[in-house]
Image (cartoon, rainbow, N blue to C red):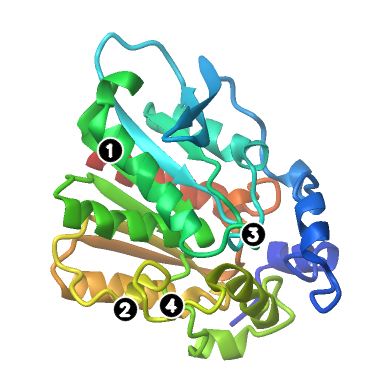
Amino acid sequence: MMLHPQAAAYLKMFPTDTGLDLDTVTDEEIVQLRGLDAMAAYRGARADVLEAADDQVAGIPVRIYRASESAVPLPVLIYFHGGGWVYGTLDRADPLARDLAVRTGAIVISVDYRLAPEHPFPAAAEDAWAVVRDVFAHPERYGADPARIAVIGDSAGGNLAAVTAWLARDAGLPLAHQVLVYPVTDVAMDTPSYRAYASGFGLGAAEMAWFIRKYAHGADPHDPRLSPLHLPDKSGLAPATVITAECDPLRDEGRAYADAMEAAGVPVTYRDYPGILHSFFVLPGFFDAATEARDHITARLKEALA
């Protein structure tokens, strides 16, 4: 491993992912801190779109983006933000959601799923699935083409995207694609990358353990709604694009999930970004790799949603 110069510069400014004393922070303080975003300046420009409208889907707040007018039904990209199932807001996700809408031409639905610790597992998974199910059930509401629906998520959002992909398969809903960006696929935290990058690389093992405790709240760690790597049968899942960062505790479980899907006959494209840290994808103001990964994902989605 050779740390990328941009990653080294990032760590000087943000040595840990949360910047919190995890031993003392209270649940009330967690809620209060959600409106703050120390990395806002690095999330990229807010691209102009035709519409960015706040709405509710099955009682869950969402923000729906349309890049341009269309007289025909459009593909839909349902986005689940990261943040360890504890942090994340529609405003924080706004620059990426706008960029995805402009890049792909799809309707982008950014989901404000319930967060832990107030709403532990399986609340986030239930909300994510409710939105996906509603888009399939009522495509006319969104101006959507039901044959061209995809999911995308990063980190904890990648976990939710993976979960909704297998729930869609089991429900007989033809999801066109799933994009999993450094996803949480197993809460066991026992991989070589967890040991190699346990501390000193931004997101650390202690922080991930904290996130998992807040969300899982004692749930069975082998429940595939929490750890999709433990899904017994991965055949028939939607084609997938999986992205990981080399210097990330989550790298190995992302790769393992890509390998498991491929072994089950699922078309998978896997790409790892050398010398790069967790969270790079949402920080194009810091990492050139964010733009490279978005270019790659855009190409994959345009092919899948053509």
Residues at marks 3 and 2 touching, judged by CB atoms closer than 8 Å: no
Q: Are marks 1 and 2 in contact (CB under 8 Å)?
A: no
Identify which residue is drawn at 68% across, 78% down. Answer: 204
Give the CA separation, mark 1 to mark 4.
25 Å
Label 3 sits on residue: 86
Q: Is residue 228 visible?
A: yes
Residue on which the image places disc 4: 186
Q: Which residue is tagged 1? A: 149
Depth check: 167 or 273 in front? Answer: 167
Name which residue type carries label 3.
Val
Query: Regarding mark 1 in the picture, which secondary structure is present there?
Result: strand
- Please give the name of the residue rendered at 54% of the width and 21% of the height, measured from the top-left corner: 53
Q: Tell me, yes or no, whether the two marked residues, 1 and 4, touch with CB atoms within 8 Å.
A: no
Quarter occupied by the N terminus: bottom right
Q: Where residue 230 is drawn, which disc sits there? A: 2
Dot 3: element:
loop
N-terminal of the two: label 4 or label 2? 4
Q: Determine whether the residue tagged by mark 2 lies in a helix, strand or loop.
A: helix
